[in-house]
Image (cartoon, rainbow, N blue to C red):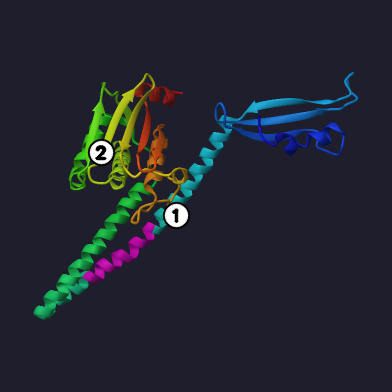
Amino acid sequence: MVPDLARSIDLDKAANGAQAPRVFSREVELTYPEHRFVRLYMVPIDAQVGHDDSGGAVVVLSDVTEDKVSMEERIESERIDSIMRLSAGVAHELGNPLNSLTIHLQLIERKLKKLQLGADARSLSESLEVCQGEVKRLDGIITHFLEAVSPKQPELNELDLIELVDEVLRVQEAELCDRSLDVNVDVNQPVPVILGDRGQIKQVFFNLIKNAMEAMQPGGELRIVTRSDDEFVYMQFIDTGSGISEAELSRVLQPYYTTKKAGHGLGMMIVQRILRDHGAQLGIESRKDIGTVITLQFPQQHRRTRLLGA
């Protein structure tokens, strides 16, 4: 069942009474029929005991999948939090020289107006405006970055997910048209409201739609499909983009990993953090040159309320 397990625990030595541990312990990862983690304990039985001189062993198997997954999630969460804090600190420090640049550019602008140097002054003023515009743009980038990476407890309110998606699509409508992309929102049944933070969930939708846009060529299509059951509300973002290879798929949620030339590699990590804070889950399926399906699973309001109460 588990390749090379017998060799790893050295059963032959145990059976022959050679110097070997009296209790063997191994953690085994199983992939069939389900992906599980099992802890195996084996206690050899001396050959003299009983009437059978062949000896044997007592084996105890414990399913530790839940503990293993919880531990991995905690480690990943702590790693993400440390990166977030580092990134926020760097971004904050960048704000100080930008403030200094803004002040000195304003001083230069005032002196130029007083000097009245004619045509040369106009040329310098235009260059100064460009510098001021770029400083303002950088300041805006840092502000939005800090808002994105700073961990904030979600402010839970009743949310209509379809209404939120429509709001985000209206903001991105011009870029979608410019790229000649079609968007279809499929709502086959009423979508129950959820409890969530309006701004944070909008940020999730914005990032996912932006990623889909940048992955598709003109004429591509993004479908947003919703469904629900008694416990959860599901939203799928299905694009016809370039897709993600199997090797890259395992790294999509890692900090600073990106396949874009201008990407910072934090978008999907932020999406995962927001969803986790909302008790929601994220699933990614993709095939190279075919497209990607992102599935969001939100707990329904009554389930969330019950969990909070517990």
- On the image, the x and y values in percent for residue 239 come to 31, 38
> What residue do we see at 25% from left, 35% from top?
165
Query: Is 262 situated left or right of 25 in this image?
Result: left
Q: Amino acid at mark 1?
A: Leu
Magenta residues (range): 91-105
Q: Quadrant of the N terminus?
A: top right
Q: Quadrant location of residue 42? A: top right
* Residue at disc 2, secondary structure: strand
Q: CA distance from mark 2 to mark 1?
A: 37 Å
Can you identify the residue that label 1 sits on? Answer: 86
* Residue at disc 1, secondary structure: helix
- On the image, the x and y values in percent for residue 194 come to 32, 27
> What residue do we see at 18% from left, 48% from top?
178
Of label 2 and label 1, which has the lower sequence position?
1
Q: Residue furthest left?
A: 118
- On the image, the x and y values in percent for residue 269 come to 41, 45
